[in-house]
Image (tube, rainbow, N blue to C red):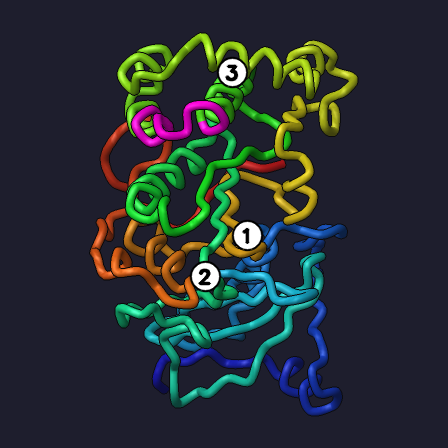
Amino acid sequence: MQTKFLIPISIIVAGLLVAGAFIYVSQGNIFSKGQLSAQAAADKAVKYINDNKDTIANGMTASLVSVSEEGTVYKIHIKIGDGEYDSYVTKDGEFLFPNAYKLEEATTTGEGSSTDNGSDVAVTVTKTDKPDVKLFVMSYCPYGLQAQKMFLPVYDLLKDKADMGVYFVDYIMHEKKEIDENLTQYCIQKVEKDKYSAYLSCFVQSGDSANCLSQAGVDQPKIESCVSQTDQQYNIYSGYNDKSTWLNGSFPKFDVNADLNTQYGVQGSPTIVINDQIVNVSTRSPEKFKEIVCSAFNSAPEECSQTLSNDAASTGIGGGTASNSSGGGCGQ
């Protein structure tokens, strides 16, 4: 028997009985109630598939290629062997809806996901004349740092063609230094935006903020003034010192981008939002990220024809490449 994704009998029966029915996958408390981030819901759906081995032929395992938001559900694109398939999972992570599978014809791209330069992207995003690209991170999250390394070459290439920026998850997990660094990066983008790429390129490699500010030629008094004003506006350090305000009693709040976190359902680092839609990058490489951003243009600019690195950067601070290039994040 050739390697193919097999739909469980329960799913086939449900599909015959009720067109478009959802399949309950919360067995064994795999899923928790309440809306999940796209990444969390997708990861748990893939876990469910792999935990139920009768769904896959020849002992293969499923892996997540991409996830995107589609109305009231998340669309997940998974790979099994040489085949790739689309399914849907509800935002509370409780129901998995298998789309119609062509068992003899495995597709390799998501619907309507080709860039103008012919590259295939397994993510469907809304197109606009000037895409809005937001990367939400915690500045000391290892996976957030990996995503920022992925982001930087694309930012340098397309920042004049798309609205691109780094934003921050509304709580921290890596002590006071993360508040300090979040505020520094927020303020550089606010008052010294043309210096941000140089600063961030230095920081993700060395982690030495003071030296990177100097190397990038940032006007430090302007940053210090911005940090002070932002702290007063959002009560960031006073909240850090008052544990009664911490999220779930465990995580200090960082409310600078709290409104956007609520708007997009951001729950962890990294989270990528393109044209108001959460997307997942199958491989955290500059080239893959560029392809997805370029697919969001109504008419992709000529810069999209340039090829960037296909290597995913290492997690955390420093150079090198990653052995696991498509998963991982920081979140409660």
Q: Nearer the viewer, mark 3 or mark 2?
A: 2
Q: Chief secondary structure of the magenta span?
A: helix
| 3D distance between C-alphas at marks 1 and 2 | 27 Å
Q: Amino acid at mark 1?
A: Gln
Residue placed at 71% from the left, 54% from the top? 29
Residue 152 rendering spot, x and y as whole percentages: 33, 39
| 3D distance between C-alphas at marks 3 and 2 | 35 Å
Q: Which residue position is annotated with label 3?
A: 180
Mark 1 residue crowding within 10 angstroms, few (<14) / some (14–19) / many (20+)? many
Q: Which residues are magenta?
A: 189-199
Q: Nearer the viewer, mark 1 or mark 3?
A: 3
Q: Amino acid at mark 3?
A: Asp
Any part of residue 140 in sight? no
Residue placed at 44% from the left, 44% from the top? 164
Q: Secondary structure at mark 1?
A: helix
Q: Nearer the viewer, mark 1 or mark 2?
A: 2
Circle 3/circle 2 CB separation < 8 Å? no
Check residue 39 in the rendering and tell me which mark sits there, or answer none: 1
Residue 229 on the magenta segment: no
Residue 192 on the magenta segment: yes
Circle 1/circle 2 CB separation < 8 Å? no
Viewer-closest of 14 and 332: 332
Q: Is residue 193 left or right of residue 234?
A: left
Residue 325, above or below 293 = above
Q: Which residue position is annotated with label 2?
A: 129
Q: Amino acid at mark 2?
A: Asp
